[in-house]
Image: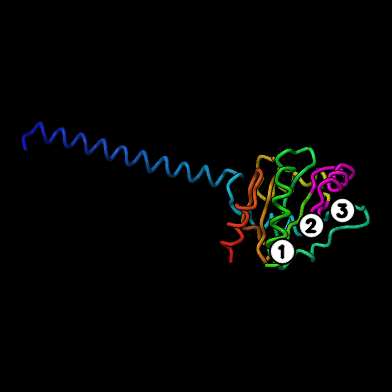
Amino acid sequence: MNRRQWVALGGTGAAAALAGALFAVMKERRAVTAAADPAIGQPAGADAALAFWDARFDTLDGQGLVPRERFFGRPLLLNFWATWCAPCVKEMPELNRFQREFGPQGWQVLGLAVDAPTPVRQFLTKLPVDFPVALAGLTGTELSRQLGNQRGGLPFSVAFDIQGQPIWHKLGATDLEELRKFATALR
């Protein structure tokens, strides 16, 4: 090999090394972005779990509070939604199908409406669901932020394990197939 070939080969090697380094940096940046993106299923911390389990939510009939003991000790899919949120309305039947399919396997769904009681009752008259719905009101927005919803958007879903710890969350509508994959992977 002559000197010119060595120089060309060295330049190609340097370019390949630079490309490799750039790829590694971009890969790391995507990983950091994914971890910071609230639409990606990163679990929230123990403090967020305590905030949820310490919270109290009014029942739709206004006669009391939803008992948290009812949900602790089994896997829980918590869904923040509102009647005025089109993606929330669209995913409601998917959540209901998930409850029907995975309820016998121990899963439970709880809908927390970030809404007023009257529109929620009217909505559920038109589209009844097989899972309980409680009222989170405007405090639901802050609770969802504590659970990982940094953008404060709806719908927002959080899954808790049997110890009551958040293990997954998603900003935006989910569907039955995504929930099936998630629940099946936890077995």
Label 3 to label 2, Cα distance in Å?
A: 18 Å
Q: Which residue is mark 1?
A: 103
Measured as percent of width and height from the top left, residue 136 is found at 81, 49
Image quadrant holding the N terminus, namely top left
Q: Is residue 19 above or below residue 139?
A: above
User: At 8% from the left edge and 33% from the top edge, which residue is drawn?
Assistant: 3
Quarter of the view holding residue 73? bottom right
Label 2 to label 1, Cα distance in Å?
A: 10 Å
Mark closest to the chain's N terminus, 3 or 2: 3
Label 3: few (<14), some (14–19) or many (≥20) C-alpha neighbours in 10 Å: some
Label 1 to label 3, Cα distance in Å?
A: 23 Å
Kind of residue sitting beneath label 1: Gly
The residue lying toward the viewer, choosing from 159 and 90, is: 90
In the drawing, what numbered circle is on residue 58? Answer: 3
Write down the region rendered in magenta: 113-134
Kind of residue sitting beneath label 2: Asp
User: At 73% from the left edge and 54% from the top edge, which residue is drawn?
Assistant: 96
Colouring: rainbow
Q: Which residue is mark 2?
A: 130
Left or right, 54 with reference to 183: right
- Residue 185 in the magenta stretch? The answer is no
Q: Is residue 177 above or below residue 102?
A: above
* Helix, strand or loop under label 2: loop
- Residue 124 in the magenta stretch? The answer is yes
Left or right, 171 with reference to 137: left
Label 2: few (<14), some (14–19) or many (≥20) C-alpha neighbours in 10 Å: some
